[in-house]
Amino acid sequence: MTPLIKLENAHKIYHLEGVDVPAVNGLSFTIHQGDFVALMGPSGSGKSTAMNLVGCLDVTTIGAIYLGNQNTKNLSESDLAQIRGKKIGFIFQTFNLIPSLTALENVALPMLFQQVSRRQRLQKARKLLEMVGLANRWQHLPNQLSGGQRQRVAIARALVNDPEIILADEPTGNLDTKTGNEIIKLLQELHKQGKTIILVTHNPELTKQATKVIQLRDGKVVGG
């Protein structure tokens, strides 16, 4: 079976003030449809760079990343944007909600770029907010919500275009333990529904939920 995601000797080198700074050094691993993968490592291990590469937010300097049979390096920025919009849902540690928009409007926003009608956008956004337990908070602005509620809004937003892949970058990093556990349970439920989950974390406790753990150190795979 063709992997959903495949990295082949992926390198990413940044050029900073005339100096080459390698962020990842020859990553090779595969992720299949329905996996729950924990991408784990300490600060500076290359986790975030690997996430950006897998999420089509960046392209490799050397090596290849395949989504199905497509080498992302051969795709235009427009093609990459379409993949990000339709196939991948992003959940960030800092939520990345727009402060001036309500919870409902934040969730509905990604559908605007997929030419979905306003009525359909709002209808689906409300349904997803109900699913994550925020049916009575849809008119609230982000600063009127707790950290856990904001992360639930971010999860609903990540799901709004029904992506195959959910990329969660330290999704519990700004939350207390109880609220963080609730967010992990939500991710587990999404996995049971057939979503492919990639969880980026430095917390070994969170890897217990994963079906596969890939450990990074100094930009290289050292386990998994």
Image: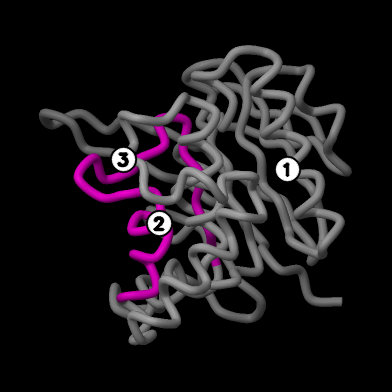
Residue span colored magenta? 88-112
Q: Nearer the viewer, residue 133 or 195?
A: 133
**Residue in view at x 76 percent, y 25 percent:** 206
| Residue 144 in the image, given as x and y percentages of width and height | 35, 30
| Residue 147 in the image, given as x and y percentages of width and height | 47, 25
| Residue 124 in the image, given as x and y percentages of width and height | 52, 72
Q: Considering only order in the chain, which callout, 2 or 3, is on the residue closer to the N terminus?
A: 2
SS at badge 2:
helix
Report the quarter where the C terminus lies: top right
Looking at the rendered structure, which numbered label has been put on residue 212? none
Q: Considering only order in the chain, which callout, 3 or 1, is on the residue closer to the N terminus?
A: 3
Number of on-image labels: 3
Residue named by callout 1: 186
Left or right, residue 109 beside residue 49: left
Q: Nearer the viewer, residue 158 or 128?
A: 128
Left or right, residue 220 beside residue 14: right
Residue named by callout 3: 141
Determine the CA span between mark 1 and mark 3. Answer: 22 Å
- Amino acid identity at mark 1: Leu
- Amino acid identity at mark 3: Leu
Determine the CA span between mark 3 and mark 2. Answer: 9 Å
